[in-house]
Amino acid sequence: MTDTAVPVTTRKDWTSDQEVRWCPGCGDYSILAAVQMLLPDLGVRRENTVFVSGIGCAARFPYYMSTYGMHSIHGRAPAVATGLAVTRPDLDVWVVTGDGDALSIGGNHLIHALRRNVNITILLFNNQIYGLTKGQYSPTSEQGKVTKSTPFGSLETPFNPISLALGAEATFVARTHDMDRKHMQETFRRAHDHRGAAFVEIYQNCNVFNDGAFERITGRDVRAEELIPLVHGEPIRFGTEGQHGVVVDPDGRVRVAEVAQVGEQALLVHDEQREDPGLAFQLSRLARGPYEPTPIGVFRAVQRPEYGDAMSRQLLDAAEKRGPGDLEALLHSGGTWTVES
């Protein structure tokens, strides 16, 4: 009888022998540590785990994991991961990408992986800058951002990654940050356990080209007042004394209010399983940027048929109805012709 039990592992087992080459103090270190420390608890095997990345600082991630992995090309990690996930449903497929990699050249690949509900876990490192290419503005950089490529300030409205994922009908959408390992690990755990496309935005500091971009909300001394924890089934409230909350006005607008003024019964109860993503989308727009109270946690977690499963069923149904395929007949069917010299 074959022993199918998953071997007990530690962080060391998931850590490769490669030297980690990120700038000292980079937020990527804490994300890497969170993942390496979480994986032993997930009940998965190293040989069945794959990390796929694109291009950028975050894309070095697969080198540092003692698993299978692929450092693919700019923006194409979701496409590569899609092919792997649908052909090898037995694998745990993770995508590691950055705000530039995923939301600029990779925008189409990202949204289609999400809408198709491919069974992959996407970790988007958002530092609001291009770090690897030395500090140009990115699709998440704020308006007015002065960089080497926008010396007079960016004119563009930035993407809100959570809003984008919800608009693409992602079935699992969450946000965490690199200053809270426990929150990261719990968020990554839930994303991994979700069947379908899971999208996690991680606020991540680039201490060389965009230092302190999220410090006004993630700093230890301001976190309680600026981060709004989303907990399924509980009223949305925050603050050192829980004195602030989120309410829905009669016109449907979501806003921050003082609990003492509106009463606890008026607070919005978070429902991550709500099928309509409209309310989750409103929560994603609650803060205009990382300088106002900002929701963090799971925005949406719903069930929908997974793409790989649906594809397998379709192929089986077709085989039952039509019998085995004939490649020769397919190649010579329809509009074929002979070219004579």
Image (cartoon, rainbow, N blue to C red):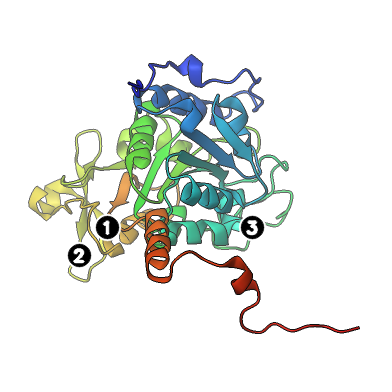
The residue indicated by pointer 2 is 249
- Specify whether 337 is left or right of 311: right
The quarter in which the N terminus is drawn is top left
Q: Earlier in the sequence, mark 1 or mark 3?
A: 3
Q: Image point 55% across, 58% down: which residue?
A: 109
Q: Position of residue 324 (x, y in %)?
A: 48, 64
Q: Quadrant of residue 35?
A: top left
Q: Image point 22% across, 58% down: which residue?
A: 274
Q: Position of residue 107 (x, y in %)?
A: 56, 59
Q: Which is nearer the eye, 52 or 281?
A: 52
The residue indicated by pointer 3 is 105
The quarter in which the C terminus is drawn is bottom right
- Asked whether residue 143 is in view, the answer is no
User: How far, Cα to Cα, is label 1 from label 3?
Assistant: 34 Å
Question: Which numbered marker is on residue 255?
Answer: 1
Q: Quadrant of residue 67?
A: top right
Q: Image point 35% across, 24% down: which residue?
A: 4
Label 3 sits on a secondary structure element that is helix
User: How far, Cα to Cα, is label 1 from label 2?
Assistant: 8 Å
Please name the amino acid that badge 3 sits on: Ile
* For discs 2 and 3, the disc positioned in front in the rendered view: 3
- Specify whether 48 is left or right of 174: right
Q: Earlier in the sequence, mark 2 or mark 3?
A: 3
- Asked whether residue 150 is in view, the answer is yes
State yes or no: discs 1 and 3 in contact (Cβ < 8 Å). no
